[in-house]
């Protein structure tokens, strides 16, 4: 579906009006590329608040028409090796810049004032290098909620100490686990025990949890691609914490719409009915999947996420608003709940007096 310029601006105008009465939060942002973990960032010599992987000029985002279901993909006739090279190049370009200004310039187009930042540990490694980089670049700014990523290098009994240590050093405020990209095999005792130990740590440290849900069909390591499917997530003992646990992508990342309807939704509904502290986010969902999720799941259990920079915050906000407007009569109230109030219940608001601003910061459209 093509979103024309006039529709984009109409939606953004309404969203910005909503943002005057409630703080909007993007609950799923990757400040660094997570599939290949490319690049290290240094301050951009030309633009304050921007951090770059090279000496590249920062160009602020522009508002305009876009393809609603766009993504990084290549034709099916490309060889696997060629497709991977093209993917690497595309992601390198997409993530050439990061930092507070890069994130907020594109988020504030839709009046989004807070971002949950989620690094991802690669298999066999911790995410500590990224955690240190993230704390250096974003730490101390109340607009950013910093996440921890559970590595597959830990035994279950080591998880609690690792969480406490990283919280003390880097100021993490949410626990992230990506079964696919980090290599947590939930069909094995060791993998399941490790994730359950993270939930124990959530309860002990009063921290919410975000867990990736769904397969990752583009992953190079085929053995890990399906670790995060809902059938495996259902094995986790979610009752080990009473803090919010968010199933990212509503548990249906990488699934066709037919698979969402026939296979995923029944499992998701059963999990949500069993555990009152489970939530879902809307990141990287097709319009049709967003629609069926909004019609199926209690709106109080849904938070907004974009999966930025894979899709920018403002574009995702426009996408979900277009679906909410289609389904609900009181669509402005529903948008405020999903993109504002629900996330604010999970991540308490802080005084934003220390938020960094820049002389030529991009401001919301008028």
Image: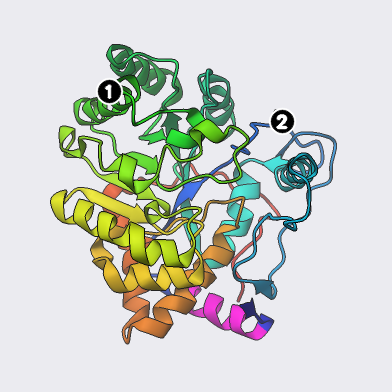
Q: Evaluate whether residue 336 shows in this view.
A: no
Secondary structure under tag 1 reads: helix
Vertical placement of residue 212 versus 308, above or below: above
Is residue 323 magenta-colored?
no
Vertical placement of residue 119 versus 79, above or below: above
Residue nearest the observer in this picture, 149 or 206: 149
Q: Of discs 2 and 1, which sits in the foreground?
A: 1
Left or right: where does residue 65 sit relative to residue 89? left
Vertical placement of residue 80 versus 73, above or below: above
Q: Please report the bounds of the magenta region as a residue range.
A: 6-16
| Image location (x, y in percent) of residue 360 | 71, 55
Vertical placement of residue 124 versus 245, above or below: above
Main SS, magenta region, reads helix
| Image location (x, y in percent) of residue 257 | 46, 66
**Image quarter for residue 243?**
top left
Left or right: where does residue 348 sit relative to residue 65? left
| Image location (x, y in percent) of residue 294 | 34, 70
Is residue 9 magenta-colored?
yes
- For the C terminus, the quadrant is bottom right
Residue nearest the observer in this picture, 138 or 276: 276
Q: Residue at x 32, y 76 (%)?
A: 333
Disc 1 crowd, CA 10 A, few/some/many (<14, 14-19, 20+): some
How much space separates mark 2 and mark 1, taking CA atoms?
32 Å
Residue indicated by mark 1:
193
Residue indicated by mark 2:
39
- For the N terminus, the quadrant is bottom right
Q: Residue at x 37, y 71 (%)?
A: 292
């Amino acid at each position: 579906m093509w979103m024309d310029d006039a529709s984009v601006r109409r939606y953004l105008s309404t969203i910005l009006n909503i943002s005057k009465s409630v703080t909007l939060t993007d609950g799923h942002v990757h400040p660094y590329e997570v599939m290949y973990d490319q690049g290290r960032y240094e301050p951009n010599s030309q633009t304050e608040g921007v951090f770059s992987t090279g000496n590249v000029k920062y160009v602020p985002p522009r508002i305009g028409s876009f393809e609603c279901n766009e993504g990084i993909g290549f034709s099916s006739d490309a060889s696997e090796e060629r497709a991977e090279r093209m993917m690497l190049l595309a992601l390198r370009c997409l993530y050439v810049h990061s930092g507070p200004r890069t994130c907020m310039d594109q988020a504030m187009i839709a009046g989004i004032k807070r971002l949950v930042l989620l690094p991802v540990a690669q298999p066999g490694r911790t995410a500590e290098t990224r955690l240190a980089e993230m704390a250096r670049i974003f730490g101390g700014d109340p607009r950013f909620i910093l996440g921890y990523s559970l590595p597959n290098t830990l035994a279950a009994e080591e998880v609690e100490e690792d969480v406490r240590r990283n919280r003390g050093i880097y100021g993490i405020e949410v626990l992230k686990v990506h079964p696919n990209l980090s290599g947590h095999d939930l069909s094995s005792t060791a993998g399941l025990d490790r994730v359950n130990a993270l939930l124990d740590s959530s309860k002990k440290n009063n921290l919410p949890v975000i867990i990736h849900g769904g397969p990752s069909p583009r992953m190079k390591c085929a053995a890990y691609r399906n670790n995060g499917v809902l059938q495996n997530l259902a094995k986790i003992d979610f009752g080990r914490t009473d803090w919010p646990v968010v199933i990212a992508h509503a548990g249906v990342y990488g699934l066709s719409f037919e698979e969402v309807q026939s296979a995923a939704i029944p499992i998701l509904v059963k999990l949500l009915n069993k555990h009152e502290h489970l939530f879902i986010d809307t990141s990287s969902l097709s319009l049709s999947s967003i629609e069926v999720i909004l019609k199926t799941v209690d709106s109080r259990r849904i938070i907004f996420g974009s999966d930025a920079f894979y899709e920018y915050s403002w574009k995702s906000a426009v996408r979900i608003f277009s679906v909410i407007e289609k389904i609900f009569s009181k669509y402005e109230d529903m948008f405020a709940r999903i993109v504002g109030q629900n996330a604010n219940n999970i991540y308490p608001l802080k005084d934003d007096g220390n938020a960094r601003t820049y002389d030529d910061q991009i401001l919301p459209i008028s």
